[in-house]
Image (cartoon, rainbow, N blue to C red):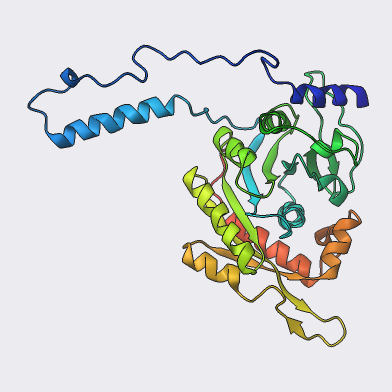
Amino acid sequence: MGAPAWRWALRAARLPGAGRAPTVPRHGPGCGAAVPAAAFADSASSGSRDEALRDRRARILSRGLPQQKPVEGVKQVVVVASGKGGVGKSTTAVNIALALAANDSTKEVGLLDADIYGPSIPKMMNLKGNPELTQKNLMRPLKNYGITCMSMGFLIEETAPVVWRGLMVMSAVEKLLRQVDWGQLDYLVIDMPPGTGDVQLSVSQNIPIAGAVIISTPQDVALLDARKGAEMFRKVHVPVLGLVQNMSVFQCPKCKHETHIFGANGVRDLAKTLELDFLGDIPLHVNIREMCDSGQPVVVSQPQSDAAKAYLKIAMEIVRRLPVPPA
């Protein structure tokens, strides 16, 4: 089924009207026109005129916002994000998804790799191959360790770069969300690309999100971007469930001495400043990196380790803060 999947990937890159000259959208009657003075009675107070103007402005602006539509078959969406790259966001997203399933075997969990330029979920979840197509022409996700997974990495060669502009990337993310047979999921964990760009805004505005989890190291430079990420979700009205401090402490395997390589308690302090919850610490441990590189994340390969227990605890904290799912 490689050819259909490749055709899907190519279609994702094509945008309607490609090659044609851009057109100016037509506005409805009165849109953008000045508000006539006669619209307000002379006896109206200044406060009522201001309120009417604000209402009119809100109606005009709301016309351009997309309508949120749930992902079919998915009860709750949790996004895992970071202000910048290199803080272990994808590793954390993978282990959180596995921890959600490990904490409650009755729950079905999915994992979407929304990082189109640098998909890493296929390697971390030890998955290869092209997704098959259903009779409804929907892609069937790949599955391992009980987690349903979808990624652009399943549709392109492992070494092939994705050289697309922003609109093409957003179109591909939309198809990864809508043109996939997710089945029935209790949680869909979305591994967002780093930063606060087009993908984050598109996902936040197009689907209802139960909550966002911000990943950061305690390093000051990372904390600056983590703060921006949290503020972005607040502006688009996505609940921020809390912050996770990754690579919090390194313990020497020989002498057991602990060293705070990237600083101590930076994320915990940021959570207090932003009045957000602190979800937990994840240590800097070689096993976390080695297990993900080998396609055997630590939550499933070493469930009794301190690292695995940290992820399991964070997953419990996330579930505690999620709203009651729809029936």
Left or right placement of residue 60 versus residue 240 in this view = left
Nearer to us in this view, 303 or 197: 197
* Rendered residue at 86%/26% (across/down): 5
Examine the rendering and report whether any part of residue 316 can be seen: yes
Nearer to us in this view, 41 or 131: 41
| Residue 120 x %, y % | 81, 48
User: Split into 4 quadrants, where in the image is the C terminus?
Assistant: top right
Task: Please count the marks in the image.
Answer: 0
Q: Considering only vertical position in the picture, is 189 above or below 71?
A: below
* Rendered residue at 64%/39% (across/down): 199
| Residue 263 x %, y % | 65, 75
Image quarter for residue 269?
A: bottom right
User: Split into 4 quadrants, where in the image is the N terminus?
Assistant: top right
* In the image, farthest residue toward the left: 43
Examine the rendering and report whether any part of residue 301 can be seen: no
Q: Considering only vertical position in the picture, is 274 above or below 252?
A: above
